[in-house]
């Protein structure tokens, strides 16, 4: 457990460093509803199938522009440690529909390592993942396939409301960075963290087989934009820039299988 404070401190330091950009731009609200089916296996193991839709709200009108299919399996080898393969299939390589908007790749296999525990009466989890984003039908001019790593830290606490309903408020932050293997000197210099996501949610568990989670998040894409200067050499636009996107979502989850009703089962948040 000693590495947990160091991991959290390093992620916080990197997030603060990336937040010191010279310029910020905020996009329109994005709607992200998702439906999940989770098949409960023995222990806390599970198979996940999820489908989401993405809609960007413009002037009070919205259009669902795409979506993503998420598949996963997670195996718990102890009470606190688990791992598993994941696969995300997007409807459009250039849209980046899913966990991070504008992240290229419509076929994204990966693997995760998760640790769950408690800190001061709160549930604390950390999720480390490595993925490889493959672009198969790109019409947006993205620069090929790329590997990336992700780290998510989260705090939550569960409250009982009556004899059946349980509420689970939760805060999380996730950072994504491209894995840069022998990048050419001629390529544009990128930020150390490429994407970040702050999320607040309240999970509502109505029964062992059904729960829903409304959530709100701010996603940030950290870029080095092309600099434009005036005649006096003053920076007009470009440089270190943070592109922010507010997101509003609703996750609906159905737990299937005879093990879903086990009283000892540890149910993960809908943000797997």
Image (cartoon, grey):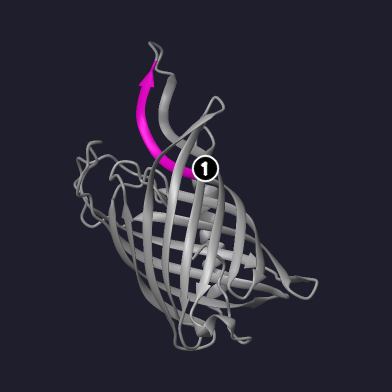
- Residue shown at 37% from the left, 21% from the top: 228
Viewed as shown, does residue 26 lie left or right of 263?
left
- Residue shown at 44% from the left, 52% from the top: 52
Q: Is residue 24 visible?
A: no
Image quarter (top left, top right, bottom left or bottom right) of the N terminus: bottom right
- The residue tagged 1 is 31
Percent position (x, y) of residue 32? 50, 47
| Whether residue 80 is situated above or below residue 154 in the rendered picture | below
* Magenta highlight range: 220-229
| Whether residue 91 is situated above or below residue 167 in the rendered picture | above
Q: Residue 50 versus residue 10: which sits nearer the camera?
A: 50
Percent position (x, y) of residue 63? 45, 34
- Residue shown at 32% from the left, 66% from the top: 110
| Whether residue 121 is situated above or below residue 245 in the rendered picture | below
Q: Residue 60 versus residue 268: which sits nearer the camera?
A: 60
Q: Is residue 38 visible?
A: yes
Viewed as shown, does residue 153 lie left or right of 140?
right
Q: Residue 196 versus residue 191: which sits nearer the camera?
A: 196
- Residue shown at 51% from the left, 50% from the top: 33
Name the element at disc 1.
Answer: strand
Viewed as shown, does residue 10 lie left or right of 64?
right
């Amino acid at each position: 457990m000693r590495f947990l404070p160091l991991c959290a401190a390093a992620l916080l330091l990197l997030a603060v460093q990336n937040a010191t950009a010279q310029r910020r731009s905020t996009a329109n609200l994005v709607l992200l509803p998702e439906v999940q089916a989770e098949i409960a296996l023995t222990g806390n193991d599970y198979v996940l199938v999820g489908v989401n839709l993405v809609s960007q709200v413009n002037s009070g009108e919205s259009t669902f522009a795409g979506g993503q299919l998420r598949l996963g399996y997670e195996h718990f080898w102890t009470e606190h440690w688990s791992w598993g393969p994941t696969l995300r299939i997007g409807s459009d390589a250039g849209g980046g529909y899913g966990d991070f908007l504008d992240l290229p790749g419509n076929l994204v296999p990966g693997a995760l390592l998760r640790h769950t525990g408690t800190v001061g009466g709160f549930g604390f989890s950390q999720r480390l993942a490595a993925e490889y984003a493959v672009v198969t039908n790109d019409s947006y001019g993205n620069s090929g396939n790329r590997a990336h790593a992700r780290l998510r830290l989260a705090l939550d606490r569960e409250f009982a409301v009556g004899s059946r309903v349980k509420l689970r408020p939760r805060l999380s932050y996730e950072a994504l960075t491209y894995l840069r293997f022998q990048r050419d000197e001629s390529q544009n210099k990128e930020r150390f963290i490429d994407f970040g996501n702050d999320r607040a949610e309240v999970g509502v568990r109505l029964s062992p087989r059904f729960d829903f989670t409304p959530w709100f998040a701010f996603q940030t894409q950290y870029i080095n934009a092309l600099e434009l200067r005036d005649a006096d050499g003053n920076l007009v636009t470009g440089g270190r820039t943070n592109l922010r996107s507010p997101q509003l979502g609703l996750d609906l989850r159905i737990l299937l299988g005879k093990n879903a009703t086990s009283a000892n089962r540890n149910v993960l948040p809908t943000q797997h």
